[in-house]
Structure formats: C-alpha cells, structure tokens
Image (tube, helix red, strand yellow):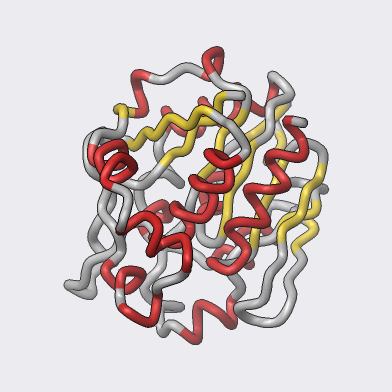
Amino acid sequence: MKILMVLTSHDTLGNTGKKTGFWLEEFAAPYYTFLDAGAEVTLASPKGGQPPIDPKSDTPEGQTELTERFKADPATQKVLANTSPLSEVSSRDFDAIFYPGGHGPMWDLAEDETSIKLIGEFYNEGKPVGAVCHAPAVLHRVEIGGKPLVSGKRVSGFTNTEEEAVHLTNVVPFLVEDELKRLGGKYEKVDDWQVLAITDGHLVTGQNPASSAETARQVLALLN
C-alpha cells in the first residue's frame, strides 16, 4: 500500500506580509494514520525539499497528540525536510494520493499543472484521491471527461464561516465552499471545527483540521 502525500511549497499569505504553508495537524494526523496502517508514504511538493509549515498551526494551542508525536520524531522530520519535487513522481508508483491543507495550497497547488494532471491520472486509474480542509482547492481546475471532477459529487472542505472566523475571507484567492458549489459539487458541512469526511466513489474530502485523521481513515477504507 503506497500513498503519495502532496504538500504546498507556498509560504506567503496573500498580500498580508504574513507567512503561511501547510497546517501541521493536517499533515501529522494523516501521515501517522497511514503509517500505523502499514502504508508506505512518500512526500512530494512543487519545489521539493522542506515545505513551509504555517506558523499558526505550530503554536502551543494548535498542538494535538499527533503533532506532538511529530515533534518527537526526528525520522519523520527528516522525511518532511526532503520531499520529492512533484515533477518527479508518477501515479503509476502509488495506490492513492492525499493533500493536506493549510492556506498555502490555495496559491500554488490549486493552479499547479503537474498537480492537476496527477490528480486526473489517479482519478482515472480508479485510485483514491483525498484532500482535507483547504486542500479541496487543489481540485478546482481538475476536469474528468470535460467536466469538473467534483461536479455531482458529495464533497466537503473549509467552510465560509470557518474562513470568516480566521479573518481571511478577503485574503484567499477564493472560498473553498463557494468554489466547490460553483463547480457543481454537492457541498456538505457540519458545525464549524467539528469532524466531517465524505467519500463519494474514490474521492474523499474533509472539512477542517479536526477532520484530518478521519479523511485519511476513509482513504484507507477504500484501499482495503
């Protein structure tokens, strides 16, 4: 069971002068969920090397059991510091693909031609495609048979009200909830910051950081 996790290389939060990147919990929870299930996990990012961690996800109040595990795990820290360039990976070598969120992916991976092509290949090969929180943004230019991949599918992702709560509604390139709806997705959500992951066919999407482990578990369920 081989899983490719794709992380952002983008570290600038729009024109705010602040930093962004991937959300630590949204990497740590799926990574260890996959690892503990016996999967072989490969990490990639557009630029390769160390992807940027969103500093807001690495505050004391942002820590969870699995981010603490990451902090005490030099082996995983080394793996994370040496992600493969996205251009060097192939869907043929993996059984599933998974995108952690954070605001970073909305700027690079959402528009990255290599990522868009890769997702299309995984999907067309019948392999699970997973994305959590802001990461469903990576689907917004993916088309299957001339139609948006998410069209007609049950999906979730970071809600408009969650984006309002973090005061970034006017900073992000688009709102995940609005974009999934615009593309014809059957968007679903629960209360802010509660757990929701949805599987429709072999597409799995999760609402927010709290949904990270459950989104990963549903990807594993498809593989099993």
In the current view of this chain or complex, which residue is farthest to the front?
A: 72
Q: Position of residue 27 (x, y in %)?
A: 44, 52
Count the numbered circles shown: 0
Q: Nearer the viewer, residue 223 or 38?
A: 38
Q: Position of residue 9 (x, y in %)?
A: 28, 46
Q: Which residue is at a point 35% across and 18% down the rendered structure image?
A: 88
223 on left or right of 103: right
Q: Nearer the viewer, residue 98 or 65?
A: 65
> Picture quarter containing residue 81?
top left
Q: Position of residue 104 (x, y in %)?
A: 36, 56
Q: Position of residue 72 (x, y in %)?
A: 31, 56
- Residue 18 drawn above or below residue 1: below
> Picture quarter containing residue 192?
bottom right
In the current view of this chain or complex, which residue is farthest to the left?
A: 17
Q: Which residue is at a point 78% across and 48% down the rendered structure image?
A: 199
In the rendered image, the quadrant that contains the N terminus is top right
- Residue 68 drawn above or below residue 160: above
Q: Which residue is at a point 40% across and 72% down the rendered structure image?
A: 63
6 on left or right of 54: right
In the rendered image, the quadrant that contains the C terminus is top right
Task: Note whether residue 49 is visible.
Answer: yes
30 on left or right of 150: left
99 on left or right of 130: left
Q: Which residue is at a point 31% across and 58% down the rendered structure image?
A: 71
Task: Note whether residue 23 is visible.
Answer: no
Q: Nearer the viewer, residue 55 or 181?
A: 55
